[in-house]
Amino acid sequence: MERVFPNGRKLRILTGDITKIAVDAIVNAANSALAGGGGVDGAIHRAGGPSIMRELDRIREAQGGCPTGSAVVTSAGVLPAKYVFHAVGPRYRDGKHGEADMLASCYETCLKLAAKLDVETISFPAISTGIYGYPAEEAARIAAGVVSKHLDSGEGSVREVILVLFDQSSYKLYERLLE
Ligand code: ADP
């Protein structure tokens, strides 16, 4: 489904594999060591090829890793995109350790990077909701809230955001939130 804002900008939700959907920027759910991992991170590196990790190696040498709530940019290797934004979501503990702010910051940072790089279409996975254990519904509220606010504001270059949900139950959750 999609939600169209009065300014014509769109928020779309889809189920599927984020590596298969052509956009200007694909957001990855990375870890602060930028070391590669399982889940969507593994899928992005497998599908995008080794050049992405080589770029991350250079970033790691230059600045160490990436703090939680922030993101770094690489090219997208052979993925159907120009960039991958490697966002570092919070590991969920009990919700009392700033997790919500850090998760919101991931989405906000990526939208800011998008504006800086003139990105018009960007896809996000459900950051932190896999291995990092963030409760799906709370995470969906944060993601939908930050993205809707940004699109509605008309600021920046992004005219379409695609939230790519890996399974039908996450999709249903977002669908309810956006209706
Ligand atoms: P995190 O460590 O931030 O929790 P994960 O990769 O474990 O990251 O999970 C984040 C979300 O991405 C989960 O909802 C998971 O189901 C989903 N996911 C896993 N593989 C893909 C993929 N290829 N495309 C889109 N989403 C994916």
Image (tube, rainbow, N blue to C red):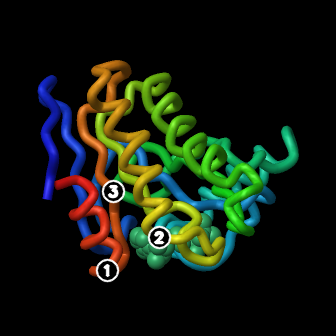
Percent x, y for residue 93? 74, 68
Residue type of the residue flagged with mark 1: Ser
Percent x, y for residue 157? 33, 24
Q: Are marks 2 and 1 in contact (CB under 8 Å)?
A: yes
Per the image, the residue denoted by label 3 is: 163
- Depth check, front residue: 131 or 38: 131
Viewport quadrant of the C terminus: bottom left
Residue at x 77%, y 46% (from the top left corner): 67
Per the image, the residue denoted by label 1 is: 169
Hey, which quadrant is residue 35 in on the image?
bottom right
Left or right of 164? Residue 37 is right
Measured along the vertical axis of the image, is residue 6 above or below residue 16? above
Q: Is mark 2 within 8 Å of ligand 1?
A: yes
Residue at x 30%, y 31% (from the top left corner): 151
- Depth check, front residue: 113 or 51: 113
Q: CA distance from mark 1 to mark 3?
A: 14 Å
Viewport quadrant of the N terminus: bottom left
The numbered disc on residue 68 is: none
Residue type of the residue flagged with mark 2: Ala
Percent x, y for residue 88? 66, 54
Measured along the vertical axis of the image, is residue 148 above or below residue 177? above
Eye-nearest disc, 2 or 3? 2
Q: Are marks 1 and 3 in contact (CB under 8 Å)?
A: no
Q: CA distance from mark 2 to mark 3?
A: 13 Å
Percent x, y for residue 168? 27, 80
The numbered disc on residue 136 is: 2
Residue type of the residue flagged with mark 3: Leu
Left or right of 7? Residue 11 is right
Callout 1: few (<14), some (14-19), or many (20+) C-alpha neighbours within 10 Å?
few
Q: CA distance from mark 2 to mark 1?
A: 10 Å
Of the two numbered discs 2 and 1 on the same chain, state the one appearing first in sequence: 2
Label 1 secondary element = helix
